[in-house]
Amino acid sequence: MKSATINNQKGITLIELVVAFVIFAVVSAASYRLFVSQSRAYAVQDQVVEIQQNIRSGMEIMLKDIRMAGFDSDNPSSKIEINTPLVPGDHSITVDYECDDTTRYTVAYWREGVSGRLLRQLIATKDDGTTVVGPQCVLLENVDALNFVYGIDHDAAGNQDGTVDYWEADSTTIGGRRVVAVRFQLTGRPDSINPDIQKVVSPRTLESIVTLRNQCYKH
């Protein structure tokens, strides 16, 4: 009596292999798209934080100098006189203040039109007339706008009534009147390292108002 041999070997068919490959491809594509989306979101957030920090740092440096506009220690031994505390400009500003009894500082800020950089320059003038012109330092790259408007005391009484009108630098209203406050806006954008990210991250603008305490009449 011959025994029957049963072929019980198992395997996968070509159709099953194709279906498994398609499922694997779909899952892989979804995972890749999720990874790319998360990476882009992280890059965008990193760019936003960086540009905001850079703008804030640049504004802090400017605020420090602008607050000092017109400062005079009134020390009897001082040989420094501040005749022009502030030179207003629509997109630039220059302030003068006493550094010590023998030195006057003239600090200028402006946006360079071609490169879009925010520049700062310090000029130190001694009481004997000698002058040291410092380099033009770059505070911030990729600056889209730097705008100033100037607060004039409403009745020219040195801010005694608390009413301040803001005017642009080319306004004839500023002429001959005391500037007691400065409001300025600084707009910056990130570096164009990644064109895709550059389209997503729009320029950021910060605004600040500083009171010129040395220009207000003392009560």
Image (tube, rainbow, N blue to C red):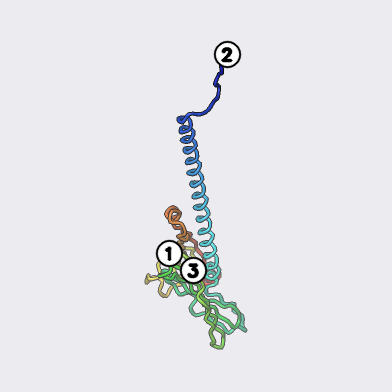
Q: Give percent across and percent down for residue 134.
A: 53, 79
User: Mark 2 Cα within 10 Å, few/some/many (few <14, many 20+)?
Assistant: few
User: How many angstroms separate mark 3 from mark 2 (CA)?
Assistant: 115 Å
Q: Give percent across and percent down for residue 3.
A: 58, 14
Q: The N terminus appears in which quarter of the rendering? A: top right
Q: Residue under label 3, please give it.
A: 180
Secondary structure under badge 3?
strand
Q: Give percent across and percent down for residue 113.
A: 41, 70
Dot 1 amino acid type: Ala
Q: Residue under label 2, please give it.
A: 2
Dot 2 amino acid type: Lys
Q: Is residue 140 above or below residue 3?
A: below
Q: Residue at x 47, y 44 (%)?
A: 33
Mark 3 and 2 residues: CB-CB less than 8 Å, in contact? no
Mark in the foreground, 3 or 2 = 2
Q: The C terminus appears in which quarter of the rendering? A: bottom right
Dot 3 amino acid type: Val
